[in-house]
Amino acid sequence: MRTTLVVDAANVVGARPDGWWKDRAGAARRLHEELLVADVPGDEVVLVLEGGAKAGVKPGRDAHVRTVHAPRDGDSAILAEARRAAEKGRQVTVVTADRALAANVGGVGARVVGPSWLLDRLA
């Protein structure tokens, strides 16, 4: 079965107290670069960016990582990406610490893991 990993970039970046709030675009770019070489499960990684973080990475595909710029809020875009992948019959995992979002993506059949799960695989 093909798999998709959907990453709530705001949650993952926010889980590291490394000064990301001073440079949201730079933090998004670093996360994108780490995802390109990370040993994470998934044929496709979807990185969802919102707000100022969108300036750090252009939307589109780069190898197995597809970057999506949320048109409004990140949660809606993450839910849409999880739903789209699930409707294609893919196994979906969403990386987030947001409880409301976790409940919503669980409703489309996605598995949810926290930011530390991903950060452990990036180190």
Image (spheres, rainbow, N blue to C red):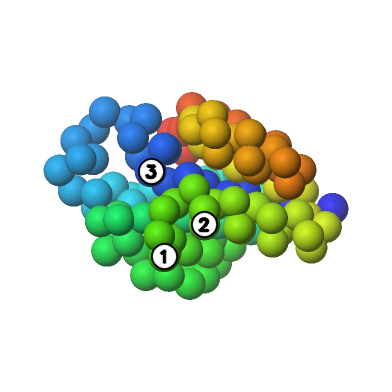
Residue 112 is situated, as x and y percent measured from the top left of the image, at: 64, 34
Vertical side of 103 occupied by 85: above or below? below
Residue 67 is situated, as x and y percent measured from the top left of the image, at: 47, 63
What amino acid type is highlighted by mark number 1?
Pro
C-alpha span from label 2 to label 1: 8 Å
Q: Label 3 belongs to which residue?
A: 10
Q: Label 1 belongs to which residue?
A: 71
Mark 2 residue element: helix
Residue 87 horizontal side relative to residue 49, left or right: right
Residue 18 horizontal side relative to residue 111, left or right: left
C-alpha span from label 2 to label 3: 12 Å
| Numbered circle sitting on residue 77 | 2
Residue 51 horizontal side relative to residue 33, left or right: left
Q: Residue at x 47, y 55 (%)?
A: 48
Q: 83 and 68: which one is in front?
A: 83
Rendered image quadrant of residue 87: bottom right
Q: Residue at x 20, y 40 (%)?
A: 21
Q: Residue at x 41, y 65 (%)?
A: 71
Q: Nearer the viewer, mark 2 or mark 3?
A: 2
What amino acid type is highlighted by mark number 3?
Ala
C-alpha span from label 1 to label 3: 15 Å
Q: Nearer the viewer, mark 1 or mark 3?
A: 1
Marks 2 and 3, the one that precedes in the sequence: 3
